[in-house]
Amino acid sequence: MGKSSKDKRDAYYRLAKEQGWRARSAFKLLQLDEEFNLFENVTRVVDLCAAPGSWSQVLSRVLIKGEKFGRCAWQDREAKFRQQMLNVFPEKQDAQDKVQDVQATQESTPAPREQVKIVSIDLQPISPLPGIITLRADITHPATVPLLLKALDPDFDPSTMNQQASHPVDLVISDGAPDVTGLHDLDIYVQSQLLFAALNLALCVLKPGGKFVAKIFRGRNVDLLYAQLKVFFEKVYVAKPRSSRASSVEAFIVCINFQPPEGFTANLEEPLGVGNKLAEMLAEKQAKEEPTTKSATQTPADKDGIYDVEVEDLTNEPLKDIRWVAPFVACGDLSAFDSDASYKLPDDHVSLDPVQPPTAPPYKRAIELRRQNGGAYKKTGTGTATAKA
């Protein structure tokens, strides 16, 4: 699909280049923050699966530069407009309005936060961003934990074998997703394992009361995932930003107020999920398995060796409701662009290049081979076409 047709189809793709974002996914994080106020009192953040760096770019501009977006920016514009209108009629402006206008002006000015620490991790290289520490590592590997703890605390000693951060973080975000195959059940399973890897890493560095945001693929049995996250967090929501296409199965799990169970210690040697204890878990389950619907009692045998079995039906007992469903929240202003709609471009529209092209995309080798073979349509460098025999 060509560049011009993509510009016509996706408004957020075009808007990201106009506003200087590295990818359209930046609007997803901004709309999540607009709904859940993720960045309130946040100074230490870990961004997992960060490439090409759009979410880290949002963190840099909001936390380090002090810029405002979404509802906060709209409120600032309203305050400035109100101040301008009151200055037109100064005799009608009382003292209380003047105080409110001064406060609004002070709040609207960029206010960088102090002692901000942001660490971004991905397997792909990330172009540098102001104030961002980037690590090229695999979040599914246990060796990544010491690297992350060292980046968060330069005084960390890896020889102690301690996998808990001495200075925990306020927020852990993850926008990672596997290369989809088109088989939805397989894609949902692989994505859930990637989310578990992000959660295992978050449990090592997240402080009590912290927040965790990650991408998920909604499927048939996703309620089990919600219930597992509810063990560690007080509130769990499923959010769908307006910039996320409605035709996509992706959504974002927003976990608020981290409260680990008493006595729980995160350790990637024994990660959450099935891990390497599947055989022990199955044996334990079979040992404890008992009939729950019917119980049978035997009477002594008669002279012919025949037993009388009395069956007691327990199906009338009330069943326990153990299913927990996470609330679904739609994020983003309804007046914003629809990611699934097509918008007519102005006549003087100029297609912009990406702000930051991928540094080392996984499809780079495929592009090089295509160029060597004459391009997508088998065109040579002189412009003549070649055909296969």
Image: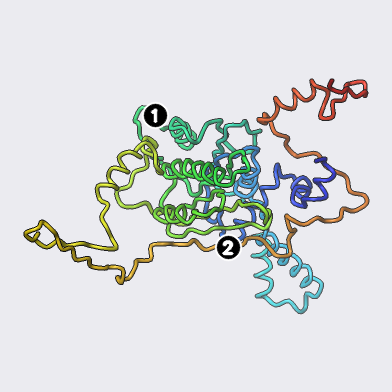
Q: Hey, what amino acid is under mark 1?
A: Pro
Q: Quadrant of the N terminus?
A: top right
Name which residue type carries label 2.
Val
Of mark 2 and mark 1, the one earlier in the sequence is: 1
Give the left or right position of residue 379, taking residue 185 as reference.
right
**C-alpha separation, residue under disc 2 versus residue under disc 1:** 41 Å
Is disc 2 in contact with disc 1, using a CB cutoff of under 8 Å?
no
Using a 10 Å C-alpha cutoff, classify the residue at mark 2 as few (fewer than 14 neighbours), some (14 to 19) or many (20 or more).
some
Residue bearing the label numbered 1: 158
Q: Residue at x 39, y 42 (%)?
A: 274
Q: Residue furthest front?
A: 304
Q: Residue at x 78, y 67 (%)?
A: 84
Question: Residue 211 has which mark?
Answer: none
Residue 303 can be seen, yes or no:
yes
Measured as percent of width and height from the top left, residue 323 is found at 42, 62
Going by the image, does 117 lie left or right of 209?
right
Residue 387: quadrant of the picture:
top right
**Residue 209 in sight:** no
Which is more foreground, mark 2 or mark 1? 2
Q: Quadrant of the C terminus?
A: top right
Residue 372 lies in quadrant: top right
Q: Which residue is mark 2?
A: 329
Of residues 388 and 278, the one nearer the viewer is 388
